[in-house]
Image (cartoon, grey):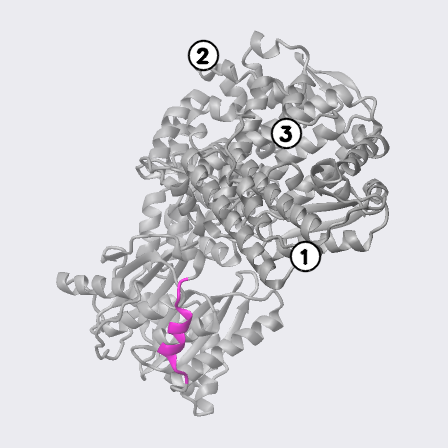
Amino acid sequence: MPVTEALIDEEALNAALAALATDKRGQISPETRSEMLAILRQAMTDGRAEAERRLKADGKGTQCARQLSDLQDMLIRAIHDFAVTNVYPIDNPTSGERLGIVAVGGYGRGTLAPGSDVDLLFLLPYKQTPWGESVVEFILYLLWDLGLKVGHATRSVIDCIRLSRSDMTIRTAVLESRYLRGDKGLHDELVKRFDEEVVKGTGPEFIAAKLAERDQRHRAQGASRYLVEPNVKDGKGGLRDLHTLFWIAKYFYRVNSNEQLVKAGVFSRAELNRFRKCEDFLWAVRCHLHFLTNRSDERLTFDVQQDMAIRLGYTAHPGLKDVERFMKHYFLVAKEVGDLTRIFCAELEEHHGKPVPALSRLLGLDKRRRRKIPGSTDFVVDNERISTAGEEVFRNDPVNLIRIFHLADKYNLAFHPDALQEIARSLHLIDADLKENEEANRLFLEIVSSRRQPEVVLRAMNETGVLGRFIPDFGKVVAMMQFSMYHHYTVDEHLLRSIGFLTEIEHGDAAESHPLANELFPGIKDRVVLYVALFLHDIAKGRPEDHSIAGARIARRLCPRLGLTAAQTDAVAWLVEYHLLMSMVAQSRDLNDRKTILDFSAVVQSLERLKMLLILTVADIKAVGPGVWNGWKGQLLRTLYYEAEPVITGGHSQVSREKRVAAAKKELAEALADWPKRERDGYLKRHYPAYLLRVDLPHKVAHAALIREADREKRTLATAVTTHDFEAVTEITVFAPDHPRLLSIIAGACAIAGANIVDAQIHTTTDGQALDSIFISREFDDTVDEERRAGKVGKLIEEALAGTLQMPEQVDRKSQKKGRIKVFSLETSITIDNELSNMLTVIEASGIDRPGLLFSLTRAISDLNLNIASAHISTFGERVVDVFYVTDLTGLKVTNGSRQAAIRRRLEAAFDGKPAEETRPAKRMEPA
């Protein structure tokens, strides 16, 4: 490596420390030690500042890590020399008074990040002596006082050998040992004995342990290398994966540098350059991250990604923010690390598989068998893994680059590392002719729509680079992240996962999570359409235009190439264009409003589309990330499906509103048949027609029981709790005197309690009472625990309505944006629509979420003298979409332009948390 100028002047540092020395050898005053510490701290501060300056200037990550390691070397050498010369001098040392300082672990490799631990081994000839103990203590206390995190051990050479045999962590640390200062002979002895007594003959054992350790680390960090908040050090495709390769190489091939891996035939020169490029980028990211946060953060969380992109010099491009371009580069590098890992393992297997039984068992080579694949002379099965029959298989017929994946799917075969390596080296053969090749496209279509495990094969195609080359539009979204808390994975990973969840539905798995989707799938007329549509639904992400419309255009161009008919192409394009429709309507529209159902049905038009759209929506939401899909979303989708189905099939007959109200009254009267007639008739008169038409019978009966009990106990305020296990929500019903701020007060109480409102249905009785149903996200799996928690929320609501709870102050304390949300910037959008409902004005408010936001919005709506009929709350990571169905106080829509403008201004101010002039809200009315 090229020699670079040191971060500090080591001679000047040593001279400054030497000037502190006194004639009184063997002691040091507190004042002198303080001066010494100040000199060392200044040197460390200056050196790190220079390292950061150089990193910003040249972007060389590996060089920065090496220079920081060199800086640490200088500080330790200076402290050691001062200690043994001035503080604990020894003129005639005994054979036991010898001490060697050795860097181990990552520090032993000669690379450090600004916040890395400094791992030291104090090496002794045999047992510790008072002199050695004093020197070690002096060095450690100074390093700790400098604020360094020091991992340390004091051992004899024989102890190191003994412990290395039994402890793989210690063995790895010693493997990377590097002499720093003191008795070099001790380190030389350690290296020689370690190689002869520990390493020799134990390569397979070490490899097995390191690969198992890697897999465990990946499970702990998240198995995908495409998690949008990756761990730079320990995540899949991170620095530790590269270090693991080098540990194994150094141990197994007995090499001391990456350069020697080329001589050993492990990597080609080009592959070694890729290794170095990946390592350099990851070190740059890690060093920048530590400098930025001033601590040893290893995770690229959302709150640092923007600043990191700026530090690394990324700029925005059309359709992609600077932070998204930075993270795309990061994920491409993580993918490269995966490629290098595969190449390395292939070489390991090929040349060392047979003679090392433990390695063979680990890599599945203990019963090595080769057999032919029916109907193919180009591929063979090698120990249940597909491999090539010769070196020219792909060059002779480039269609084989697709065929190998088709055969792997057809015969349920894993991929031999050699085959994956050959594929990666043959990507240049995927040209325009292959993309238009009829057989290649037919094989690909069968892979995408396979009845087996298409996600597994498609992921292999993506990992090797074939998928992005063969489908260039897919290649554009490979490693693309969206700067949003809602999306857990990169776009390509999301698409592949959605295919996996579609397969899960088709196989009838997880029926308890999405029963309707599982029930509908066997009746789908063309499953190929569904698989292709899901594969393409987000393929146009990262473009300046709406990705649904652009995606439909891509589908119309790509589907004929894949061999789909005109009718299939139209179906795929429609599903891609409208893939968000069902989710949006279900989560942010009033499904009890007849016009919602009619408008949705008018777009969908056919039952087959409705079925496919529901299944696609379920798979899409589930693939967003863990915890995004829940029972409440499933219930909303099922409700929309069941409401739209009769309209689309023509089974719904248009009955007049009066007749429907009369029928609803009769139905409720029959359900309350055990009530005295006079009481029953009086109760029916307490409800407006809107309530009778919008609320289902079980809820009406439950409401009747709540109100009846409250009347008997002469209470005007009552709450009831109902848990909905399958829907993963808890319903709190509030019966209280009508008040224009009622929903706002309820929302405030929920905010104070930490309860997340997902939906609200608001009704008023003819005698001036309010009957509101609030749905909050479930907190506990156990029903008893959830009922207890919801009961506390209900009591808090009662206290708030009774005026014994200081609402605004407590909500304000809860309303500060959380750290992760602060970094996002979203424009607040307030839309007012009078076409979405026949009777009500629909206000949609979207923007950055924060605790207490619903309280602020509903309070503002009350101040504006608007009556809320229903509220629908959806959160997508940092973005919230709150939809309110409202009327003015006369029960009519809000049509006046200046009134609408005032609503927008007031709600925008509420989003921003700005105070607005208080107005006295009038009494709310139930819409007719």
What are the residue bounds of the magenta stretch? Answer: 805-817
Q: Which mark is residue 341?
A: 3
Mark 3 vs 2, N-terminal side: 3
- Of circles 3 and 1, the one toward us is 1
Report if residue 813 lies within the magenta region.
yes
Report if residue 132 lies within the magenta region.
no
At a point 24% along the width and 55% down the height, the residue shown is: 835
At a point 43% along the width and 20% down the height, the residue shown is: 561
Give the answer, above or below, for where 709 lies relative to 666.
below
Q: Secondary structure at mark 2?
A: helix
Q: Classify residue 365 as left or right of residue 509.
A: right
Q: Classify residue 70 as left or right of residue 483.
A: right
In front of the other: 32 or 540: 32
In front of the other: 357 or 566: 357
Q: Name the quadrant of the C terminus.
A: bottom left
Q: Mark 2 — residue?
A: 433
- Of circles 1 and 2, the one toward us is 1
Mark 1 vs 2, N-terminal side: 1
Q: Position of residue 23 (x, y in %)?
A: 65, 54
Identified by mark 2, the residue type is Asp
Identified by mark 1, the residue type is Lys
